[in-house]
Amino acid sequence: MNRFFDSTTVGFIIGTVILFLIAWGVKGLEIAKTSVKNGFDLFLRYGVLIVFSMIFASLLQTLIPRDIIVKYLGTSSGWRGIMLSTLIGALTPGSPYAAMPLFAGLIKMGASFPVGVAMACSWVLLSVGRIPFEAAVMGGEFTLIKVISSLLLPCVAGGIAQILQYFLAR
């Protein structure tokens, strides 16, 4: 098998066929076909987003000099890089389809894994784009407590990643 059809891809293809057959048997052919159509609609919607977010990340890689990434986010950046990446992650807008290619691009340019871990954790826990929505749904008190209690977690995760990387590299 080539890289496109790895075990995960084949597993999803087989699982999808099995679920289609189950849906057909339980709900009927029309509902099963409608579900497949809805899946293709989602693919088109998010496929475009994924493609352009990856192009965006690639364009950023051409515009930001590699030596700046290595200096501020590379392996020698240590805790300063982890703290900076925590801020970058918190300020990164959008869905995982937009954020993850950006983070992967920074790692490809020379950001360390611990920095990437802190960035991804910060984006999940502290993304400023989600805070207003979270406050509207969960309430201001919950959001405030969650944000304050989560402030150090990306740095802790980056530190743990740094320790793990050190021991795994030995």
Image: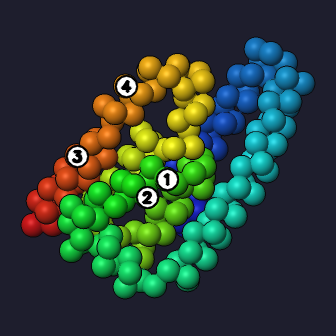
Q: Based on the displayed image, in which of its 4 quarters is residue 13 positioned?
A: top right
- Label 2–label 4 contact, CB within 8 A: no
Q: Earlier in the sequence, mark 4 or mark 3?
A: 4
Asked whether the viewer can see residue 110, the reply is: no
Q: Amino acid at mark 2?
A: Ile
Element type at marker 1? helix
Give the spatial CA distance, label 2 vs label 1: 5 Å
Instruction: Answer with left or right where residue 69 lies relative to residue 55.
Output: left
Give the spatial CA distance, label 1 vs label 3: 18 Å
- Label 4–label 1 contact, CB within 8 A: no
Give the spatial CA distance, label 4 vs label 1: 19 Å
Asked whether the viewer can see residue 17, the reply is: yes
Q: Is residue 115 above or below residue 108?
A: above
Give the spatial CA distance, label 3 vs label 2: 16 Å
- Label 4–label 3 contact, CB within 8 A: no
Determine which residue is flagged by label 1.
Answer: 91
Q: Residues within 10 Å of mark 3 (few under 14, many from 20)?
A: some
Location of the C terminus by quadrant is: bottom left
Q: Which mark is residue 57?
A: none
- Label 2–label 1 contact, CB within 8 A: yes
Determine which residue is flagged by label 3.
Answer: 156
Q: Which mark is residue 145?
A: 4
Location of the N terminus by quadrant is: bottom right
Q: Is residue 65 above or below residue 97?
A: below
Q: Amino acid at mark 3?
A: Val
Q: Earlier in the sequence, mark 3 or mark 2?
A: 2
Which mark is nearer the camera, 2 or 4? 4
Q: Residues within 10 Å of mark 4 (few under 14, many from 20)?
A: few
